[in-house]
Image (cartoon, rainbow, N blue to C red):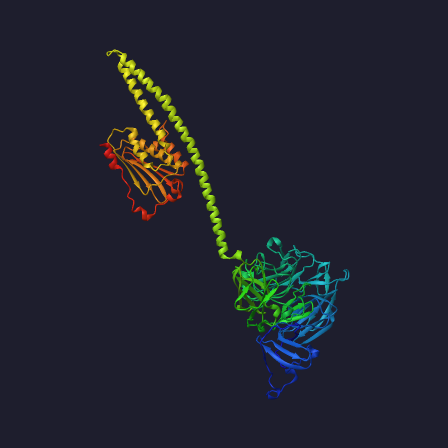
Amino acid sequence: MNLPARRSVFKYQSSKLDKVELRVRFPERLENRKTPVTDASLEIYNEKSGLSGDSTIQVLEDREGTIWVSTSKGLDRFRYSHFVSVNPSQGHQNFTLLAGGGGGEIWAGSAAHKPITLIRGEESVSKDDVKYISSFYRADGGVVWWGGFGGVWRQQNDRFDFFLQPPDTKTDWVWEVIRADADGGLWIGLGDVGLIYFKDGVWSKRPLPEGLLERVPSASYHASSGKIWLGYTENRAALLDNNKVRAFTSADGLDIGRIRVIRGRAEHLWFGGELGLAIFDGERFRSIRKTGGERFGTVSGIVETSDGALWLNEVHGVVYISPDEVRKMVENSDHQVNFRLYNFLDGLPGAPQMNWTVSTAIEATDGRLWFATDNGLAWIDPSKTVKNDVPPPVVVRAISAGEKTYETTASLSLPKGTESLRIDYTALSLSIPERVRFRYRLEGFDDEWRDAETRREAFYTNLGPGDYRFRVIASNNDGVWNENGAVLEFTILPMFYQTRWFLLLCAAAVVFLVWLGYKWRVREVKSRLRFQFQERLAERTRIAQDLHDTLLQGFVSASMQLDVAVDNLPADSPAKPRLNRVHEIIGQLIEDGRNTVKGLRSAETNGSTDFEQTFFRVRQDLDVQKRIDFRVVIEGLPAPLDPVVNAEAVFIGHEALVNAFRHSQASVIEVEIEYASKNFRILVRDNGVGIDSQILRSGRDGHWGLSGMRERAEKIGARLRLWSRAAGGTEVELSIPNRIAFNNQMSRRVPVWLRKFYTPKSESTKMEQEDR
């Protein structure tokens, strides 16, 4: 079977296959080929090379391009692998990688007892005498300096020369090789000794540039501009430029812990450390965040390609960041990066290499990217990556409630009282099923989509009765989503106490109880007001009786005695005119006292339907002699008032009328009594001289009429409005809500159909007849 390059064999280990549509693909018959088939044009797979058996039964290709081969011993899967693994020889570890010449070859050194190897295509050539490689520096003229255990190697073409470390030092690793000057001098980072100057095979102690730390850096990078970047532990870095050192710390935004790798391209400079990735903008460092606000893991290798993409050898795998995402995170400091992660499922032979002091990722001259892992090397060609564009079909398999599982039928009803359930779903993508991701949402319960990662179950609790619609969507291994997904509609039947009629009945009961509480409260308030009124009424009656029996009787007796005394005086007595004046004053006081007693007793009515007659009698009680056009107008159907309200309204109306008759000097006085649908209203108005604004606000000194009217209106929850204008008359309006005014609830409203049969009776004719 002729398979494309970089396809690898995977034995399918699952004990149960999801249902998937497969189609047969027969290879072209070899005898019909125009070009003779040679062994080089075929890749032969048998049991020795990993196939489950030597006897092939059938070959199938599924909808995603995966090849399935059934043999006499099992089922094998051939799928596209993004990475190709390469292991120079068994036992290589802790690689140091360097891109070679224009053929795409690379040099791979190992810290183990393994020789440095040149990998060119499918071939590899080892230098058996060059071992224990830990670092490198590419100098001018094609010279490469390799740091190793116990010294340094100088490579020029295929020749390697070894220079032993200073004899007065303990044998140790050379962790860094750094250019010291343009004449070929180097700074060699030797174990715990620090930086030692080396030139032309001679080791010497030489003062370091001022500000440069003596200890060995944890990372270095020689920029094309000639500047050298050095990284250290504890968020420290240094820039060496013509022996001038500029130091950077966490105060400059550096927050990635120990720096493991520094790489750059064009104007971008990247720093990888134990706590993630950072970029240097020329003045400060800025940590890069992933989607969700998290840091990247430890970064030991960085490659920025010519198209602007960024590749990281990160602790979780190889990270790819697209050019567009790189542009966004360079321009916007708050941008959270979207990326793609490659791991063993994509062909990486192991976890990314995290130790050593050089970049564990490099770009070869042919564009391929090489990554070091703890189980060998792997390369990828970014220009030839294949994307799975086939969205996976999604299926809802079952729904479980309690201990019972239900089939996903069109009209599914779950039992009454169901609160918790589990929904099983899956997506049919067999290329890399471990990469299939899901999102789901239960309409009627969830406000947003839930990210389930690779989980194929959804759990819900505390559900109520109603209609629900479960939606689930999925993406394949390359992040292509099936936006339509699968849908399951179901209904949870309600218990009797969850039905609408039960809830309505409960709501009605609550409203009824609230209404009863309100009625009880109103009745209690009215009873208290009535009791207070009875107390005040009794007190008023007692005061009226005392005034009549004591003060008035005393004035009458005094008047009679004075009358006798005046009669006994001679007609020409000089005291007689003065005594006659005193007699007239006493008579006026007696008359005023009687009027006051009448006013006190006028409030003794107890909700009589002759409420209007009270106002008719005011003119008679006051014995007004002046000709005044006085009338009482009634609108609406009269109804008995609450006794307490009746008493207070009579007092307020009586007080307003008395003031009008005594002080207004009016020719027209009118009382309007309105039984409206919402309010009971009394309006007393005249066309007299009006009331001064100051008196209207605070009352006349020594008189309590206006303030008493306001207090009484407030006590019964009524609204009192007084309006007056000089020479424009006065209006006094009392408005009482029907719920307060009337003793009987049925008399709150007068039906519209009844009002047209009732014609308010104007009393002006009656009053005129009485005047005549």
Q: Position of residue 322 (x, y in %)?
A: 56, 66
Report the side of 120 relative to 465 (left or right): right
Q: Position of residue 713 (x, y in %)?
A: 39, 36
Q: Position of residue 605 (x, y in %)?
A: 36, 33
Closer to us: 532 or 418: 532
**Residue 641 visible in image:** yes
Q: Is residue 374 above or below residue 568?
A: below
**Residue 483 visible in image:** no
Q: Position of residue 676 (x, y in %)?
A: 34, 43
Quarter holding residue 548:
top left
Quarter holding residue 451:
bottom right
The tally of labels here is 0
Report the side of 443 relative to 600 (left or right): right
Closer to us: 585 or 292: 585
- Position of the C terminus by quadrant: top left
* Residue at 27% over, 14% down: 567
Quarter holding residue 223:
bottom right
- Position of the N terminus by quadrant: bottom right
Closer to us: 490 or 291: 490
Q: Is residue 451 above or below residue 607?
A: below
